[in-house]
Amino acid sequence: MAAEGESIERAPLAERAATDVQWLELLRDGLMFDLCGLSAGDAIPFSTIEHKFDLEKVPSAALYEALNLRPGHHLAGGERSMPVVKGMIALARDLVHHFEDIDAIVWPPSSSAIGPRFFESISTSWLEGGPFPALGLTAFKETIDGAIQSIGLDFWIDQELRIEPPLSLDRVSATRLGVRLVNQLILVGGIDGSERIVAPDGNVLVMRASRNGKFVRVGRE
C-alpha cells in the first residue's frame, strides 16, 4: 500500500495477508483510514448480508476472508459525516480498481454485498457529482403491510423511506421512485414536515415525516 500521492503496485491480497502487519493506515483527501484483517489470526467478523447487487452468490465466511476498512481513530465522532464517508467510499473504490482479487464490497448499513465492477461504477459516478448510489449504499424491502421501505438510509439522514400502499403495489415502479427520492433526501438531509412532489407519471405525491421522525412516508395526495 502507499500513502497519498504514491503509486500502488498490483499484488494479490493473499500475499499481503501473509505478513505480520495487522492493519494499514491509508491516507485519502487528508483523512486517515485503517484497513484491518491483513494478518493471520482472528478473522474479521463477517457482516450479515441480505441484499446483493451484481453478484451471483452472496459471500459467506465459509468461502471468503473479510477485510475491514474504517475511519481512523482521529476521526472518532465524525464517522458518519459526509466528507469522511465519501473519503472511505473513494478509498474502497481505489482498492477495487487496483486489486483484482477483491470479489465483493460489503456495506453493513444496508446489509448489502456489491460486485466490484458495479461498485466501482456507482461510486465513481457519485463521487464525480452524479446521483447517490441508492441501489447498493441503501436497499429496499417489502414490509409486512405491503410498503416498500429503504434499508440503510438512516445511516445517512437518520430516517428511512417508506412508499405506502397502494403506491407500492407496483414494486418495480415503487423501487424506481424510491431510488429518486433517496437521492433527493440525501441532498436535503431528510425532512421534518411534509412536501409535495411530482412523480414521473405526473401524479402529485406527498412526502411526510412520521410522528416519531424515523420515517419519511410517501403516498398519493
Image (cartoon, grey):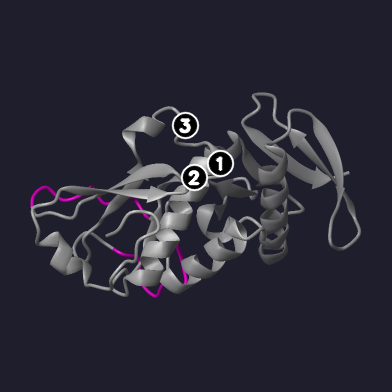
Q: Amino acid at mark 2?
A: Val
Q: Is residue 45 magenta?
A: yes
Residue 31 in picture, x, y percent from top left: 42, 42
Q: Is residue 170 above or below residue 74?
A: below
Q: Is residue 38 left or right of residue 182?
A: left
The magenta-colored residue range is: 41-59
Residue visible at 69% across and 24% down in the picture: 211
Q: Nearer the viewer, residue 184 or 20?
A: 20
In the image, which disc is placed on residue 78?
3
Q: What residue appears at the point 42 percent right and 56 percent down from the top-left corner?
A: 91
Q: Is residue 176 left or right of residue 119?
A: right
Q: Amino acid at mark 3?
A: Gly
The answer to whether residue 10 is left or right of residue 140 is: left
Distance, label 3 to label 1, CA atoms, is 9 Å
The answer to whether residue 26 is left or right of residue 77 is left
Tag 1's secondary structure? helix
**Picture quarter with the C terminus:** top right
Q: Which residue is mark 2?
A: 85
- Residue 86 part of the magenta-drawn span: no
Q: Quadrant of residue 71?
A: top left
Residue 74 horizontal/vertical position (percent)? 36, 31
Which residue is denoted by mark 1 in the rendering? 82
The location of residue 149, given as percent across then percent down, is 61, 48
Badge 1 amino acid = Met
Nearer to us in this view, 169 or 214: 214
